[in-house]
C-alpha cells in the first residue's frame, strides 16, 4: 500500500511516499531554517506562507522520486495536530484537495504519533507494546504505546518542552537556531559538572517534568556572568545544560519502562538526536536490561515519512477523515 504523506506542522514542509508502513520510497523536505534564523525562532505567518509556496511541488516530487504515478497511490496521510495552526492548516487543506482529486482515503495523523512511528523505519523488528520518550521543540512526554494506534501519556512536562529550552538558551548565547544541534556540538569535551543547574521534580507525579526553572536558571547565569564582566565557559555550560536535561528525562522514562514491564524503550523527536541523551539512555538500558530503539538522526526531526508510516497503521485501524477535517494547535495523543 503506497501512502502519500504530508507534514507542515512547524517550519519544515515535507512530503513522502511510504509503502506498507515501513518502507520509505521517497522523502522530500523544504527547510525554512535559514529564514527563521534571522528572527531567532519561527515566525508563524512566514512559516505558513512558505508552506503554501512549497507544498504542491514537493508532493509532486515525492511521487516522482518514489518511481510511481499518482494512479498508484492508495491513500493520503497528513499531520492534522498539533502544531502552529496556520502551518498545519496548509498541509490539511492540501491533503484534502489531493485526496479528493485522486479519489483516495484521507488519513489524519497526530504529529507525535508520527515521531514515534519513525522508529519503525529504522527498526523494522520493533512492534508495540513499548514505552517511548518523545522530546522535541513542542513536546516532552513519556508515552505508553500499547498498540500501533492505542497510546496514552504516562508523564510529561508541566511547562516548557526540552527542545524549546535548548532553542531559547542557544538564542541568548547567539550560537544559532534551532538550538539543539549547536548546543550538542558545543558541549563536546566540556566539563558537565562546572555549572550546577537545577533538575526539577514534581511532587506526587514522579513521571512528570518541568523545564522552566532550568531555562530561567540558565538565562540568569548567562546574564550574571556578562554583568560581572566574566567569561562563560561555553563548552562546560553547554555540557552542564545537556546533563541537566538528560537527568530529567532518562530516569523517568526508565521508571516508566519498569512500571509497564514491556522490556522495550524507544525515543522520538528532534531532541532524540542529542548525543548526551542517547548515550545516557544506552547506559541506562544496558543496566536495566531494556532494549533501546533509537531512530536514525535523519528521522528525528520533522519529516513526512514518519507521517506515512503511522498513516498506514491508522488506515489499517479504520481511522479516516472526511472533507470536514480540521487542523488543531493542540490535541491529546490518545485521540489520534
Image: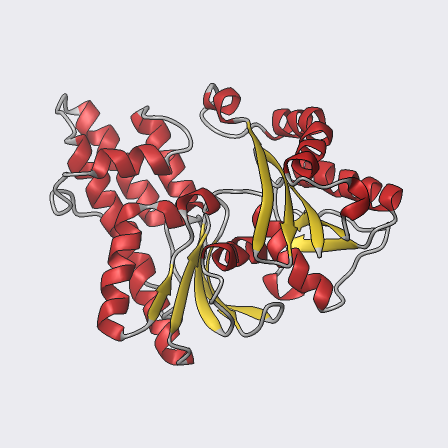
Q: Relative to the observer, which residue lies in front, 283 or 71?
A: 71
Which percent across, then down, holds residue 231? Answer: 13, 25
Image: 209 above or below 175: below
For the point 41% across and 29% down, the residue is 177
Which percent across, then down, holds residue 134? Answer: 46, 56
> Image check: 227 left or right of 5?
left
- Quadrant containing the N terminus is bottom right
Image: 175 above or below 112: above
Q: Relative to the observer, which residue lies in front, 158 or 264?
A: 264
For the point 36% across and 38% down, the residue is 180
For the point 73% across and 40% down, the residue is 89
Image: 113 above or below 29: below
- Quadrant containing the C terminus is bottom right
Q: Relative to the observer, which residue lies in front, 3 or 7?
A: 3
Q: Relative to the observer, which residue lies in front, 321 or 153?
A: 321
Q: Residue 204: in sight, yes or no?
A: no
User: Residue lying furthest front in this view?
Assistant: 67
Amino acid at each position: 500500500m503506497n501512502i502519500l504523506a504530508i507534514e507542515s506542522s512547524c517550519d519544515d514542509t515535507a512530503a513522502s511516499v511510504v509503502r506498507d508502513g515501513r518502507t520509505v520510497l521517497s522523502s522530500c523536505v523544504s527547510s525554512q531554517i535559514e529564514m527563521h534564523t534571522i528572527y531567532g525562532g519561527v515566525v508563524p505567518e512566514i512559516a505558513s506562507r512558505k508552506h503554501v509556496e512549497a507544498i504542491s511541488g514537493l508532493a509532486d516530487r515525492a511521487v516522482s522520486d518514489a518511481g510511481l504515478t499518482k494512479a498508484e497511490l492508495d491513500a493520503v496521510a497528513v499531520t492534522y495536530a498539533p502544531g502552529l495552526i496556520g502551518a498545519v492548516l496548509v498541509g490539511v487543506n492540501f491533503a484534502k484537495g489531493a485526496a479528493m482529486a485522486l479519489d483516495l482515503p484521507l488519513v489524519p495523523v497526530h504529529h507525535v504519533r508520527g515521531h514515534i512511528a519513525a522508529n519503525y523505519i529504522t527498526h523494522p523488528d520493533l512492534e508495540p507494546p513499548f514505552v517511548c520518550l518523545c522530546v522535541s521543540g513542542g513536546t516532552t512526554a513519556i508515552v505508553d504505546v500499547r498498540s500501533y494506534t492505542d497510546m496514552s501519556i504516562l508523564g510529561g512536562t508541566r511547562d516548557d518542552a526540552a527542545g524549546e529550552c535548548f532553542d531559547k538558551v542557544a538564542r541568548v548565547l547567539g550560537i544559532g537556531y534551532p538550538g539543539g544541534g549547536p548546543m550538542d556540538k558545543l558541549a563536546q569535551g566540556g566539563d558537565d559538572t562546572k555549572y550546577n543547574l537545577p533538575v526539577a521534580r514534581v511532587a506526587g507525579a514522579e513521571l512528570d517534568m518541568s523545564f522552566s526553572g532550568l531555562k530561567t536558571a540558565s538565562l540568569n547565569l548567562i546574564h550574571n556572568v556578562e554583568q560581572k564582566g566574566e567569561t562563560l565557559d561555553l563548552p562546560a555550560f553547554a555540557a552542564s545544560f545537556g546533563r541537566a536535561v538528560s537527568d530529567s528525562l532518562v530516569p523517568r522514562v526508565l521508571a516508566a519502562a519498569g512500571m509497564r514491564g514491556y522490556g522495550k524503550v524507544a525515543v522520538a523527536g528532534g531532541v532524540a538526536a542529542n548525543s548526551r541523551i542517547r548515550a545516557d539512555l544506552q547506559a541506562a538500558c544496558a543496566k536495566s536490561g531494556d532494549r533501546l530503539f533509537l531512530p536514525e538522526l535523519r528521522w528525528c526531526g520533522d519529516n513526512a515519512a514518519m507521517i506515512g508510516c503511522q498513516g498506514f497503521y491508522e488506515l489499517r485501524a479504520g481511522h479516516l477523515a472526511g472533507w470536514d477535517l480540521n487542523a488543531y494547535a493542540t490535541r491529546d495523543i490518545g485521540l489520534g
